[in-house]
Image: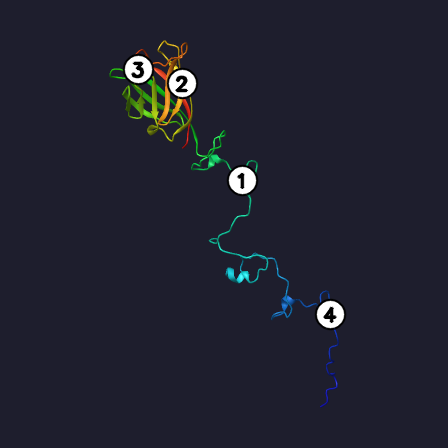
Amino acid sequence: MTDFGRRPAAAAGPHKTTHEDGGVDEISIAGLSGQAADNQPARVHQIGGAKHTASTLAQLNTKISDATLDDKTSVRPPEVHKAHHEDGGTDEMSVAGLVGTTPRAILGDATAGRVLRCSYIHFDDGSVGDSLKCTLVALFNGDAIAETDNIAKDATTGHFALNATGTQLLILNTGLTGEARFIMADIIINATGQSILVYPGMHVDGIRLELQGISDGTSKDITGLVDVADVYVTILYITDA
């Protein structure tokens, strides 16, 4: 029997625009399976997310053209940036936050390693005969020598030496930190009743101290002076270490 009610299907003519964006029969790529033939623009996502599989630095470096990645154990020489840490810099450093000591030059002769020190010496009467009892006490970065009794004339006792006339006392280098390169001294307590001044000086073996009368400039026997009362002398000095 012949079916007179059907007509053969007509071939579809060009109609791609109906399926394109805005067409009456628009197709979404999201509804299609398979992989697009053309590269698709990357969507915004974090590199640490699930979109990426694990890669090594060596693999990443093959994809990077303007730098090289390395791990945290690799040495990274810093860029020149000292101005950032200097006075007024954006990352200013303070020496108060640093430990250790560094030899520095005292302004004057600019010799590195010299140190400013201050101590005082107490002259007292020795326990035996014409002798002295001396104690060196540190004030600022200075040296200290424990009380030393019976410092006799023309003899060395501990870290002190007294000349034969008792007019010059040496604080020996053995009791000092480094050798003295400059000395100033002043009497701070004088209970002897005599008008005296201290005349300091450098000696190859240490710091020399001499007490002199103000009126006549003569050197005084220190053992005789302290028979009456004590004398205290402040010493400001610079050592080579």
Give how far across and how far down residue 21 sits, in percent: 71, 65
First in sequence, mark 2 or 4: give its number.
4
Element class at badge 1? helix
In whole angstroms, how far apart are the C-alphas of marks 1 and 3?
A: 57 Å
In the rendered picture of this protein, how many numbered marks are placed on residues?
4
Q: Amino acid at mark 3?
A: Thr
Determine which quarter of the picture holds residue 41.
Answer: bottom right
User: Residue type at mark 2?
Assistant: Tyr
Residue picked out by circle 2: 199
Where does label 4 land, which residue? 18
- On the rendered structure, is 221 left or right of 42? left
Within 10 Å of the Cα at label 4, are there few (<14), some (14-19), or many (20+) other Cα atoms? few
Query: The N terminus lies in which quarter of the figure?
Result: bottom right
- Residue under numbered circle 3: 223
Q: Say whether marks 1 and 4 touch (CB < 8 Å).
A: no
In the rendered image, the residue lying farthest to the bottom is 1
Q: Is residue 147 visible?
A: yes
Q: Residue drawn 39% across and 17% down?
A: 198
Which residue is under mark 1?
Answer: 85
SS of the residue at dot 3? helix
Residue lying farthest left? 128
- Please tell me which of labels 1 and 3 falls first in the chain: 1
> Residue sitting at 40 percent across and 20 percent down?
200
Question: Quadrant of the image for the C terminus?
Answer: top left
Tag shown at residue 106? none
Q: How is the image coloured?
A: rainbow
CA gap, disc 2 to disc 4? Answer: 114 Å
